[in-house]
Amino acid sequence: MEKDSYKENTESSNNQGNPDTVTVAESQADSAKKENKINFDFGKSVNETKGILKDAILRPHSVVKSNHTISIETSAIILLLLSLIIGICGFLFYKFGFDGLLSMFRDIGIMFLITSTLSWILTFAIGYASIYFFLAYLGNRKMSHRELLTKYVIVNIPFTLVFALVILFFGFLLVDLFVITYVFSLMLYGVIHIYLFLVHMDKPKFDLYWLMAGYLLLLTVLSYQLTGIDFASF
């Protein structure tokens, strides 16, 4: 009896000690996870950006078809930079384009630059969300955010270069050609999503032609409403 009671006491004491040890271990693991989430490796993001920048410009399709991925944080930073580039180009065009006549129609200042950049951040966010849900529910393809966001960033890098060149080059030189190329650039943004859908879908749930036509119309209207220039003001 004494032996049994001794065993019970030792077991109970061990059980009382183990929860404390488990609790300490769990708290350490939670703190380590929090530290990993808080400590953002900016140097890694810079290296990842350098690693895909050249390929994204010269051969974006090859990168999209490959298994190369970057972190979600790096993708977000790149999209922010792309939005800022377009915002700066739009600001310069409105401020100094057409011999400065555009500035007569609206107040062109730092707030214009901020709102223009934010509008493109929102445009990229809506574009990514649309392609994600489009693939998941209409293309029978569920992709991870890291993989799809990487591919979305890769195809938007050359698009931003084209869009920036249109705004700065054609916008400062030829009015009529600028209008044509500006609308073309907005359509190119819609084609990006159609391209990603066609490359990664398994099987569309509806007729592919009308699905793509409706999607292109929707994205063109949304992107124009968010970032378009009011040509009626001319």
Image: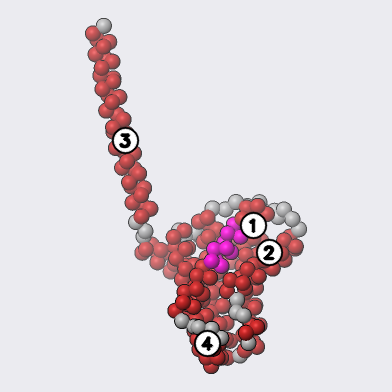
Q: Nearer the viewer, residue 125 or 136?
A: 125
State the residue position of label 4.
103
N-terminal of the pair, mark 2 or mark 3, is 3
Q: Is residue 129 magenta?
A: yes
Q: Residue at coordinates 76% horizontally, 58% vertically from top-left?
A: 207
Report the magenta residues as a range. 122-132
Nearer the observer, 120 or 162: 120
Other residues around mark 4 within 10 Å, as few (<14) / some (14–19) / many (≥20):
some
Q: Is residue 93 visible?
A: no
Residues packed near mark 2 inside 10 Å, few (<14), some (14 to 19) or many (20 plus): some
> Which is more foreground, mark 4 or mark 2?
4
Position of residue 58 measured from the top left corner of the image (x, y, whole percent): 54, 73
- For the residues marked 1 and 3, what is the alpha-carbon distance in whole angstroms? 44 Å
From this viewpoint, which residue is outermost toward the bottom? 99
The residue under label 2 is which amino acid type? Tyr
Q: Are marks 1 and 3 in contact (CB under 8 Å)?
A: no
Left or right: 97 as drawn, with respect to 18: right
Work out whether mark 4 precedes mark 3 in sequence or the reverse, and give the earlier one.
3
Above or below 131: residue 187: below
In the rendering, which numbered label is found on residue 25? none
Residue type at tag 4: Ser
The residue lying toward the viewer, choosing from 50 and 108, is 108
Q: CA distance from mark 4 to mark 3?
A: 64 Å
Kind of residue sitting beneath label 1? Phe
Q: Earlier in the sequence, mark 4 or mark 2?
A: 4
Q: Which mark is residue 134?
A: 1
Label 2 sits on residue:
215
**Magenta segment, prevailing SS (helix, strand or loop):** helix
Q: Secondary structure at mark 4?
A: helix
Q: Is mark 2 in CB contact (under 8 Å) with mark 1? A: yes
Q: Secondary structure at mark 1?
A: helix
User: Residue 148's image quarter?
Assistant: bottom right
